Image (cartoon, rainbow, N blue to C red):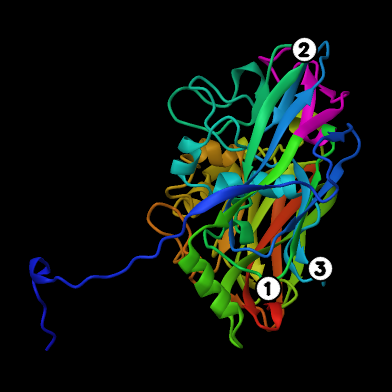
């Protein structure tokens, strides 16, 4: 029988080692801190991360944004990252993050679905994810009425100002790259230089013009001005605790090294022409990850400017009914009826608990479906994810994934996010990701 002693009689001392961070500005490898993107082309920026212990999730990218005056009002998409691609890799080509395209759409889906209510409330207008005004959230397709009333809190989807120049500051936390290595709140030491490369999205994908700042749907036009990002820098959160750094150095100098579970997403886009039945089929295997945690499906209109991020499915305007399969086995016993019964909201309601998706209206505006293979066992009560939890479907054997849609007779871009897990090991032989 274990004997327990009253805590008031326990006098043992223990030592606590805490991480502490200071932000070190890393300038782009080119030395160029002013980036100009045109309406039709983006620009690459590359950083080399030093051989120091750092925490990616507490790091951020800073830039001042300037769009010259125009007779119309500028609108700049928020609730997403202004990057079309994000990659983190070693100089030998070992990728820890490889969003080669549509990183802005990836972040638009995951920031809404995987941010906690607390993260939304604590966001500021310098961040990509923050609360809109109390009266309404302007968004393409909803006109001057916006998305909501004062009954509940919703994210801001657009940043705007009266006709003229638009200038503001961006401070983009890398943790906004949800379900990636940048979302792991841990100090890591790679033992070698790691490269981070982003591509700033072309101007007409991340911004547009409209007649007045009060209505994003009136007199809409593609962005005609260049966008300038100045004072660009990566502010890397460097570990300052000598005890933590020494412990990490000892581990990576050993044969076994240290290992962490590394979220590793893969994105697929399938453009399908107008039809009332639009189906997606994927083959997943070890090239995707070691284990499959979830699959998110969503549908974007094949549009630009104010509707570039449009996935509003109110009233089943895009997806009317659907179901999904794994290896020809249905994952839903009955076909989910979005148009008539709101089956999708009831199916996903538990999944959205403690996230920024407070209700069915926000879900419909940011519509997606998710098949989850860990039954949310990796989520804490506040909605945060336990990054030490390993689970999901083994990808040693190939899986076939299908989703069958009944849709409006319109051309759509079907966007699928495969959330996988790899094991990142750093030892005396280098970096291994399996």
Residue 171 in view of the camera: yes
Asked if residue 429 is positioned above or below residue 330 in the image, the reply reads below
- Disc assigned to residue 289: 1
**Label 2: element kind:** loop
Image x and y of residue 161, in percent = 68, 16
Q: Are marks 3 and 2 in contact (CB under 8 Å)?
A: no
Question: 47 or 366: which is nearer to us?
Answer: 47
Image x and y of residue 423, in percent = 62, 76
In space, the residues marked 1 and 3 are separated at their CA atoms by: 21 Å
**Residue at x-position 54% and y-position 22%:** 136
In space, the residues marked 3 and 2 are separated at their CA atoms by: 44 Å
Please name which of the two marks, 3 or 2, marks the residue nearer to the observer. 3
Please name which of the two marks, 1 or 3, marks the residue nearer to the observer. 3
**Label 1: element kind:** loop
Please name which of the two marks, 2 or 1, marks the residue nearer to the observer. 2
Quarter-of-image position of residue 394:
bottom right
**Residue at x-position 79% and y-position 45%:** 412
**Residue at x-position 83% and y-position 14%:** 70
**Label 3: element kind:** loop
Disc 2 target residue: 164
Disc 3 target residue: 91
For marks 3 and 2, the one nearer the N-term is 3
Let me know if residue 229 is in the magenta part.
Answer: yes
For marks 1 and 3, the one nearer the N-term is 3
Q: Quadrant of the C terminus?
A: bottom right
Q: How many marks?
A: 3
**Residue at x-position 54% and y-position 69%:** 373
Asked if residue 228 is positioned above or below residue 214 in the image, the reply reads below
Residue 407 in view of the camera: no
Image x and y of residue 187, in percent = 54, 63
């Amino acid at each position: 029988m274990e004997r327990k002693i009253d805590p008031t009689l326990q006098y043992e001392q223990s030592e606590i080692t805490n991480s502490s961070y200071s932000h070190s500005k890393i300038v782009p490898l080119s030395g160029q801190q002013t980036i100009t993107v045109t309406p039709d082309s983006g620009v690459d920026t590359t950083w080399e991360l030093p051989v120091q212990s750092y925490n990616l999730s507490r790091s951020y990218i800073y830039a001042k944004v300037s769009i010259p005056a125009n007779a119309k009002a500028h609108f700049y998409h928020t609730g997403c990252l202004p990057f079309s691609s994000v990659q983190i890799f070693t100089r030998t080509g070992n990728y820890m993050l490889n969003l080669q395209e549509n990183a802005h759409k990836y972040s638009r889906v995951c920031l809404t679905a995987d941010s906690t209510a607390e993260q939304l409330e604590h966001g500021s207008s310098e961040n990509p994810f923050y609360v809109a005004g109390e009266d309404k959230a302007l968004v393409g397709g909803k006109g001057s009425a916006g998305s909501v009333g004062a009954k509940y809190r919703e994210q801001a989807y657009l940043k705007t100002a009266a006709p003229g120049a638009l200038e503001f500051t961006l401070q983009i936390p890398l943790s906004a790259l949800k379900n990636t290595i940048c979302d792991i709140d841990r100090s890591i030491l790679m033992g070698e230089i790691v490269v981070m490369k982003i591509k700033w999205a072309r101007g007409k994908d991340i911004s547009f013009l409209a007649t007045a700042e009060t209505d994003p749907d009136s007199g809409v036009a593609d962005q005609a001005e260049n966008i300038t990002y100045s004072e660009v820098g990566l502010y890397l959160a460097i570990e300052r605790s000598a005890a933590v750094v020494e412990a990490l150095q000892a581990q990576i100098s050993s044969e076994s090294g240290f290992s962490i579970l590394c979220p590793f997403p893969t994105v697929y886009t399938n453009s399908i022409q107008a039809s009332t039945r639009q189906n997606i089929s994927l083959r997943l295997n070890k090239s995707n990850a070691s284990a499959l945690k979830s699959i998110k499906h969503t549908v974007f209109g094949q549009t630009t400017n104010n509707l570039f991020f449009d996935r509003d499915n109110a009233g089943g305007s895009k997806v009317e009914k659907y179901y999904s399969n794994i290896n020809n086995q249905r994952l839903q016993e009955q076909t989910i009826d979005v148009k008539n019964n709101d089956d999708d909201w009831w199916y996903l309601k538990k999944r959205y608990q403690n996230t920024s998706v407070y209700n069915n209206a926000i879900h419909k505006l940011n519509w997606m479906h998710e098949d989850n293979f860990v039954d949310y066992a990796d989520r804490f009560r506040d909605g945060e994810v336990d990054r030490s939890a390993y689970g999901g479907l083994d990808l040693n054997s190939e899986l076939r994934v299908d989703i069958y849609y009944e849709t409006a007779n319109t051309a759509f871009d079907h966007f699928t996010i495969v959330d996988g897990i790899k094991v990142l090991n750093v030892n005396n032989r280098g970096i291994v990701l399996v």
